[in-house]
């Protein structure tokens, strides 16, 4: 089988506390020129993954703590390792082990004694899935690079995407959003203004007010950004944020004039942190405000009906909490 890239063969981590089991699995796998890495317990496995994430993991369940189930659970909880395909190896007839494996997030199962043909088929299938996943992540990386290129056109917005990503996730956590929505907020922090790639630089950097015709062009950027990202199914939860982060609570926003709770909550979250960050950073058309003044502006505009007042209140609570929003990684913009 060809590897996940033309440059190297797939790396497979085999985890078992029995040397003979490791020898057997390695013998089966090296027939296909896979690169096999061994670990003899859960701690060593987690260290191996942290050092160099493999393309697939074969994980025995019966090991000293942390056992295979706990190792699998930890890997699936982490953003950077959750997409590594993991095969749980169980003893024949252990229904309970399969249930625990499913709960831990395992992608597939093998039963001891492991048969070479079955092992080969399952490994091939999951490596192919990993290849597709990697290709999707590469496309997302290209889109993020484009978004950062748009950001780089305006020196005043340096770091804006990264800050928005962090702020939005913190506010999403405060509102107890599920993990998939938090991931969408993190991605949207970088991709929300991708559509500005279609806006002339002179308009983005204009120090004075835009003409009605210029404003019409700028207001198309959420639609353009959504259109660029739409082919990627992995961004399905990001698309509504990109399209609707300029809607207003009273329906006076754009591009669709949505109002109230018809605006997705994730879009309302990004909108508020976007406005705040714009207020506390120098822009071509005005000087920055202090954090206190920016908070007051948010409250006033929420009273006008522009933003969800409940989300604004949660944001301001985070802003004022010890160790909360803006306390780490962004002190340079806090005045």
Image (tube, rainbow, N blue to C red):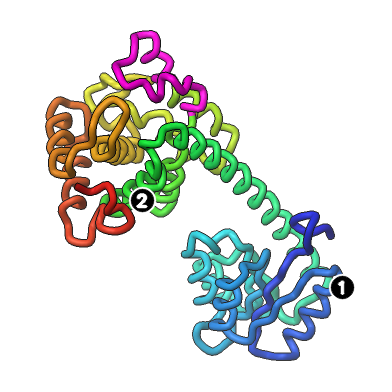
Q: Position of residue 105 (x, y in %)?
A: 53, 65
Residue at the spot x=66%, y=76% of the render?
A: 89
From the image, tell me which residue sits under label 1. 31
Image: magenta residue range: 195-219
* 185 magenta-colored: no
Residue 322 picture location, percent across and down: 18, 61
Residue at left offset 50%, top offset 83%: 66
Q: Which residue lies at the image location 25% right of the left edge and 39% below the top edge?
A: 276
Going by the picture, which residue comes out furthest to the right? 31
Examine the rendered structure and indicate whether residue 155 appears above or below residue 74.
Answer: above
Relative to 203, residue 334 above or below: below
Q: Quadrant of residue 84?
A: bottom right
Secondary structure mainly formed by the magenta segment: helix
Q: Residue visible at 49% across and 71% down?
A: 74
Q: On residue 166, which mark appears?
A: 2
Q: CA distance from mark 2 to mark 1?
A: 45 Å
Q: To which quarter of the image does residue 7 belong?
A: bottom right
Q: Nearer the viewer, residue 48 or 17?
A: 48
- Depth check, front residue: 250 or 89: 250
**Magenta stretch: residue 210 in it?**
yes
Residue 306, how many percent across, how many down? 21, 27
Residue 176 in view in this figure: no
**Tag 1's secondary structure?**
loop
Residue 146 placed where, x, y %? 54, 36
Secondary structure beneath label 2 = helix
Decide: is 267 above or below 19. Answer: above
């Amino acid at each position: 089988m060809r590897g996940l890239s033309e440059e190297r063969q797939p790396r497979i981590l085999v985890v078992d506390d029995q040397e003979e089991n490791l020898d057997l699995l390695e013998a089966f796998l090296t027939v296909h020129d896979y690169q096999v890495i061994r670990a003899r317990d859960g701690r060593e496995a987690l260290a191996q993954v942290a050092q160099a994430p493999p393309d697939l993991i074969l994980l025995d369940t019966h090991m000293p703590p942390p056992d295979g189930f706990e190792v699998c659970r930890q890997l699936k909880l982490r953003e950077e390792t959750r997409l590594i395909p993991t095969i749980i190896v169980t003893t024949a007839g252990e229904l309970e082990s399969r249930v625990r494996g499913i709960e831990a997030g395992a992608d597939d199962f093998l039963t001891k004694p492991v048969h070479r043909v079955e092992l080969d088929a399952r490994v091939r299938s999951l490596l192919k899935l990993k290849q597709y996943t990697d290709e999707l992540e590469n496309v997302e990386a290209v889109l993020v690079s484009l978004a950062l290129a748009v950001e780089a056109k305006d020196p005043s917005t340096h770091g804006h995407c990264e800050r928005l990503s962090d702020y939005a996730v913190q506010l999403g956590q405060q509102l107890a959003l599920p993990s998939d929505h938090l991931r969408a907020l993190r991605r949207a922090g970088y991709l929300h203004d991708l559509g500005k790639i279609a806006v002339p630089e002179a308009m983005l950097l204009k120090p004075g007010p835009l003409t009605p015709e210029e404003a019409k062009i700028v207001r198309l950027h959420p639609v353009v950004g959504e259109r660029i990202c739409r082919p990627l199914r992995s961004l399905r939860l990001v698309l509504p944020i990109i399209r609707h982060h300029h809607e207003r609570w009273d329906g006076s926003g754009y591009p669709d004039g949505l109002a109230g709770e018809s605006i997705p909550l994730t879009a309302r979250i990004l909108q508020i942190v976007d406005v705040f960050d714009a207020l506390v950073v120098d822009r071509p058309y005005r000087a920055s405000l202090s954090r206190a003044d920016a908070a007051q502006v948010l409250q006033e505009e929420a009273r006008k009906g522009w933003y969800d007042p409940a989300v604004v209140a949660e944001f301001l609570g985070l802003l004022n909490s010890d160790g909360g929003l803006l306390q780490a990684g962004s002190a340079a913009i806090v005045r």
